[in-house]
Image (spheres, rainbow, N blue to C red):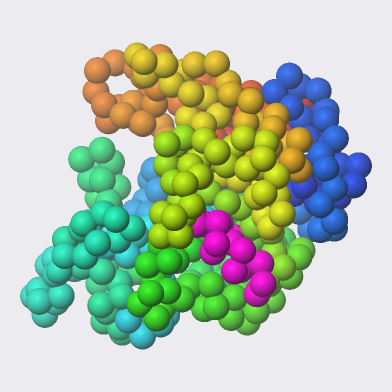
């Protein structure tokens, strides 16, 4: 989610958060000095600004969190590819947006797992279905991935059953392989899902993730990945284990991180995006990833309102911003960017993405990498 860009200006954390004298472009198109946080320069300046993150891969075109989705995002030109990680019963990390795999796999068609269907409360929400933590990796590998929202993305159902559920280890091998083929490093954006919930089950995510990152040499300050979580304590824990850059994800303004709920911390996103909250985050992270409505609030009639001060305030705190999620379909767009009456048809996503990028954000998560990259190209030329 970045903004106006000068030719050849290629920075993500290097300029916005990692070094003295670095600069970021604010919403007005002028450069402003970012505070030095003593984390050093290096590899991050190889990325363009604004960068585009393939959200769960190219999930607008392939079932999410499959090697097919990741590959298509990379082939489309996404600068960074996102993974969400959850554990299996025997402690392996696999890539799923949620531990509830009811909608993203064919598990319901497997009679041998019918008795695994159960009801759980995850981060305060009661869910009924099948969950990764109740399957060994070998069992999970007998399942096939499928489209999560087939009513909206019917064309994606063409690929139901083509791929399995990838382990994060397999993704790291894929990234290494693609990096050698392309002669460059493949950047990843890796999220710990429900870390407090899993820690209580004895399946702590951070240590497992750190071990895999070390195995592939991706644990260093200049490694080609970002680590992200909606729970600040997970980012703090990761900071004690690995040195790579970290991003605190934030929901809508009224949302409260689940670890805050558990700890009795009353702060919400609205508190964390104020200067004091951003300063606190900058003590252990290099960026934030807020919901796009935190950057561009919606009006009562669900249209785009005036930009908030969050971009300016975050940059002043030395933080980059990677908001989420840009999608092409009308159902995901503000009312003034929808086209026609079919909620599943494409709206003016290109126009909306440009509106988002014009706020000065440093990157944008998108299910539709090609659309987002086309929008970003205009700002990269400035």
In the image, 145 versus 194, the foreground residue is: 194
Query: In this rendering, would 309 be left or right of 174?
Result: right
Q: Residue at x 59, y 61 (%)?
A: 235
In this view, which residue lies farthest toward the right? 21
Residue 226 shows up from this direction: yes
Please give the name of the residue rendered at 25% of the width and 77% of the height, measured from the top-left corner. Answer: 134
Q: Is residue 121 magenta?
A: no
Q: Nearer the viewer, residue 214 or 318?
A: 318
Q: Residue at x 38, y 57 (%)?
A: 97
Position in image of residue 128 (x %, y %)? 16, 61
How many numbered badges does the structure rendering display?
A: 0
Query: Compared to 378, does 260 lie above or below?
Result: below
Residue drawn 36% across the image and 31% down it: 332
Q: Which x, y percent locates residue 37?
A: 81, 52
Is residue 228 shown in magenta?
yes
Quadrant that contains the N terminus? top right
The answer to whether one can see residue 48 in this image is: no
Residue 120 lies in quadrant: bottom left
- Give the side of residue 120 with respect to residue 168, left or right: left
Relative to 248, residue 93 above or below: below
Can you say which quadrant of the picture contains the C terminus?
Answer: top right
| Magenta extent | 227-241
Q: Position of residue 15 (x, y in %)?
A: 81, 44
Image quarter of residue 34 = top right
Image check: 338 left or right of 74?
left
- The answer to whether residue 320 is left or right of residue 39 is left
Q: Quadrant of residue 27?
A: top right
Q: Where does the image place residue 372, in percent across and percent down from the top left?
A: 54, 35
**Foreground residue among 346 and 233:** 233
């Amino acid at each position: 989610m970045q903004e106006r860009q000068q030719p050849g200006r290629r920075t993500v954390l290097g300029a916005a958060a990692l070094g003295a004298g670095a600069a970021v472009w604010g919403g007005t198109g002028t450069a402003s000095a970012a505070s030095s946080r003593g984390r050093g320069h290096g590899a991050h300046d190889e990325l363009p600004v604004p960068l585009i993150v393939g959200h769960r891969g190219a999930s607008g075109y392939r079932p999410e969190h499959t090697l097919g989705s990741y590959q298509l995002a990379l082939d489309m030109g996404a600068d960074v590819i996102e993974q969400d990680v959850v554990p299996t019963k025997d402690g392996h990390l696999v890539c799923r947006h949620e531990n509830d795999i009811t909608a993203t796999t064919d598990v319901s068609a497997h009679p041998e797992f019918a008795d695994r269907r159960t009801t759980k409360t995850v981060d305060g929400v009661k869910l009924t279905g099948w969950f990764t933590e109740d399957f060994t990796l070998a069992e999970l590998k007998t399942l096939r991935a499928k489209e999560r929202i087939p009513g909206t993305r019917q064309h994606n159902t063409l690929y139901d059953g083509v791929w399995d559920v990838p382990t994060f280890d397999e993704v790291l091998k894929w990234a290494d392989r693609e990096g050698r083929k392309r002669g460059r490093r493949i950047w990843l954006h890796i999220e710990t899902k429900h870390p407090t919930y899993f820690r209580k089950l004895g399946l702590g995510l951070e240590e497992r993730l750190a071990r895999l990152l070390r195995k592939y040499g991706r644990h260093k300050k200049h490694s080609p990945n970002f680590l992200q979580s909606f729970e600040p304590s997970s980012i703090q824990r990761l900071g004690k284990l690995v040195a790579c850059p970290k991003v605190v994800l934030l929901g809508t303004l009224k949302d409260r991180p689940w670890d805050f709920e558990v700890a009795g911390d009353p702060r919400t996103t609205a508190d964390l995006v104020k200067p004091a909250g951003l300063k606190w985050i900058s003590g252990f992270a290099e960026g934030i990833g807020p919901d796009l409505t935190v950057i561009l609030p919606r009006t009562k009639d669900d249209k785009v309102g005036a930009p908030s001060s969050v971009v300016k305030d975050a940059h002043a705190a030395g933080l980059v911003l990677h908001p989420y999620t840009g999608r092409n379909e009308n159902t995901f767009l503000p009312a003034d960017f929808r086209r026609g009456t079919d909620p599943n048809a494409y709206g003016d996503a290109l126009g909306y993405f440009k509106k988002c990028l014009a706020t000065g954000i440093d990157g944008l998560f998108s299910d539709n990498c090609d659309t987002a990259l086309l929008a970003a190209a205009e700002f990269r030329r400035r």
